């Protein structure tokens, strides 16, 4: 059965480009009207729902305008793009807490300064920030609950905490300024669990992030360990002694989803409060968090390296959790800066032998467009083939993943049948027209990249893969 197409004249109040008259009548049958730039109208029915399109022809090109009520939507979208730096929708939220003025243990010098400086940095990055300094347990719990409401539907949710924190019975706790913590049983009522923070930031769609500068050498640890018991111990005291697993530093954690938890010091170790305005960890965080084009994973790698240098390897920051392959930025790169790496790159890869297994080398041509690298060796889907995908930041940092199928067993670390799926990662830096990338796990492999300046060259692959 054929569908009847009903065409009818449409009245256009005005044409977009200098109409001859304030009102013109266009007819869909002759596809034109008196507008100077040929206003085109098409009307058709599809399944009973009539759709109208209006457009304007310029030579051989034709553009279509949507019905009038879409105009406001289009304008709003354009404004959102134009003013993206001031966040068209409130999609970034931060909660920043700094506890210095402890009432029952010696005070800390830096946490409130750390929190104020981090809050200001996040605000410059278009976060809507809630600040909380020298908070008691009721204030901290209330702030976390309110922040969870904001995180619903947000794109990014970030919590920064500076102050005392402890690990007790395998769980991490942040300490309000009014805490006494005579026993571990007091932690749920006098402290705030990191697990509760995790539940709130996990509501964000793109990134949930908890940054804890809370691994300081903690006076609460000793007070919890030095518990006086009667002789013989009561049943309650026996329970406390049996579960007394308080330690310095924080415990390792495994957040789920798109959540990262960054410790200022690796689990089980302590962090320095520092002698300057900020702690060593916060000093490095502030120096890097506003760098344009620095991806979130690269940000914390830079912080780690800088803190280890500043503390002579006595303090090693650590990040728990994993993210998807999508690149996440606090300050997105300038597209024009990323495009400086666009073009064809000749890549030579060489992998060392391991034990009885032979080394191998290869060469392939990769293309980079808008900071995305793609390369291929072998015929995709065949044994011995590898597909390379990479992302390049504005500063030249490159991360590459290799996926494919194993080839000759003589060249694989674990002898496997040809065609076994393989996957590994590499990372490095591109500078101007050259670059070096190293495999980050497994056998040692090195890429040497060189940009082809005179067009697309032919690629020549070595036999061994």
Image (cartoon, rainbow, N blue to C red):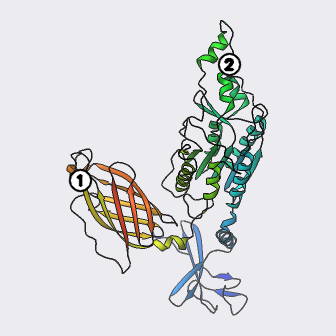
The answer to whether residue 30 of the structure is visible from this angle is no
Farthest-out residue, top: 232
Q: Residue at x 37, y 67 (%)?
A: 449
Which quadrant of the structure image shows residue 427?
A: bottom left
Task: Give percent across and percent down for residue 16.
Answer: 67, 85
Q: Residue at x 62, y 46 (%)?
A: 211
User: For the residues marked 1 and 2, what is the alpha-carbon distance in whole angstroms?
Assistant: 62 Å
Q: What is the crowding at mark 1: few (fewer than 14 residues within 10 Å), some, or many (at least 20)? A: many
Reply above or below: 56 against 94: below
Q: Earlier in the sequence, mark 1 or mark 2?
A: 2
**Quadrant of the image for the N terminus?**
bottom left
* Viewer-closest of 38 and 77: 77
**Quadrant of the image for the C terminus?**
bottom left
Q: Nearer the viewer, mark 1 or mark 2?
A: 2
User: Which element type, helix, strand or loop, lies under badge 1?
Assistant: loop
The answer to whether residue 376 of the structure is visible from this angle is yes
User: In the rendered image, which residue does mark 2 sit on?
Assistant: 227
Q: For this view, does 78 lie left or right of residue 409?
A: right
Task: Give percent across and percent down for residue 451.
Answer: 38, 73
* Viewer-closest of 122 and 34: 122
Q: What is the crowding at mark 2: few (fewer than 14 residues within 10 Å), some, or many (at least 20)? A: some
User: In the rendered image, which residue does mark 1 sit on?
Assistant: 407
Task: Give percent across and percent down for residue 242.
Answer: 59, 17
Which quadrant of the structure image shows residue 104?
A: top right
Q: For this view, does 455 lie left or right of residue 89?
A: left
User: Which element type, helix, strand or loop, lies under badge 2?
Assistant: loop
């Amino acid at each position: 059965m054929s569908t009847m197409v009903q065409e009818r004249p449409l009245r256009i109040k005005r044409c977009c480009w200098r109409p001859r008259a304030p009102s013109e009548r266009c007819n869909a049958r002759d596809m034109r009207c008196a507008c100077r730039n040929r206003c085109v109208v098409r009307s058709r029915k599809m399944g009973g729902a009539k759709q109208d399109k209006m457009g304007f022809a310029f030579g051989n090109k034709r553009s279509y305008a949507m019905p009038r009520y879409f105009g406001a939507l289009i304008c709003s979208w354009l404004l959102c793009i134009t003013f993206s730096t001031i966040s068209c929708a409130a999609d970034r939220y931060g909660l920043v807490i700094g506890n210095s003025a402890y009432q029952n243990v010696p005070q800390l010098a830096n946490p409130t300064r750390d929190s104020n400086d981090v809050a200001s940095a996040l605000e410059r990055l278009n976060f809507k920030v809630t600040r909380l300094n020298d908070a008691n347990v009721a204030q901290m719990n209330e702030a976390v609950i309110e922040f969870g409401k904001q995180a619903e539907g947000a794109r990014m949710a970030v919590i920064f905490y500076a102050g005392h924190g402890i690990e007790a019975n395998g769980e991490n706790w942040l300490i309000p300024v009014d805490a006494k913590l005579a026993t571990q049983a007091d932690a749920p009522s006098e402290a705030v669990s990191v697990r509760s923070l995790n539940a709130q930031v996990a509501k964000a769609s793109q990134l949930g992030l908890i940054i804890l500068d809370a691994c300081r050498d903690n006076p609460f640890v000793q007070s919890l360990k030095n518990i006086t018991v009667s002789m013989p111990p009561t049943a309650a005291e026996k329970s406390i002694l049996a579960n007394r697993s308080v330690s310095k530093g924080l415990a390792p954690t495994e957040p789920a989803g798109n959540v990262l938890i960054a410790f200022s010091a690796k689990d089980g170790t302590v962090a320095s409060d520092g002698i300057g305005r900020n702690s060593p960890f916060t000093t490095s965080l502030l120096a890097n968090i506003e760098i344009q084009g620095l991806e979130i994973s690269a940000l914390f790698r830079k912080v780690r390296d800088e803190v280890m240098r500043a503390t002579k390897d006595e303090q090693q920051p650590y990040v728990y959790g994993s993210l998807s392959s999508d690149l996440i930025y606090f300050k997105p790169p300038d597209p024009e800066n990323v495009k400086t790496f666009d073009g064809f790159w000749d890549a030579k890869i060489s992998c060392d032998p391991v034990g009885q297994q032979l080394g191998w080398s290869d060469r392939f041509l990769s293309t980079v467009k808008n900071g995305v690298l793609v390369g291929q060796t072998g015929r995709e889907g065949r044994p011995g083939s590898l597909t390379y995908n990479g992302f390049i930041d504005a500063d030249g940092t490159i991360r590459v993943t290799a996926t494919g199928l194993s080839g000759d067993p003589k060249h694989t670390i674990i002898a496997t049948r040809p065609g076994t799926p393989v996957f590994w990662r590499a990372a490095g830096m591109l500078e101007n027209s050259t670059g070096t990338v190293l495999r980050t796990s497994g056998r040692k492999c090195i890429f040497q990249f060189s940009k082809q300046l005179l067009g697309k060259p032919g690629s020549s692959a070595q036999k061994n893969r």
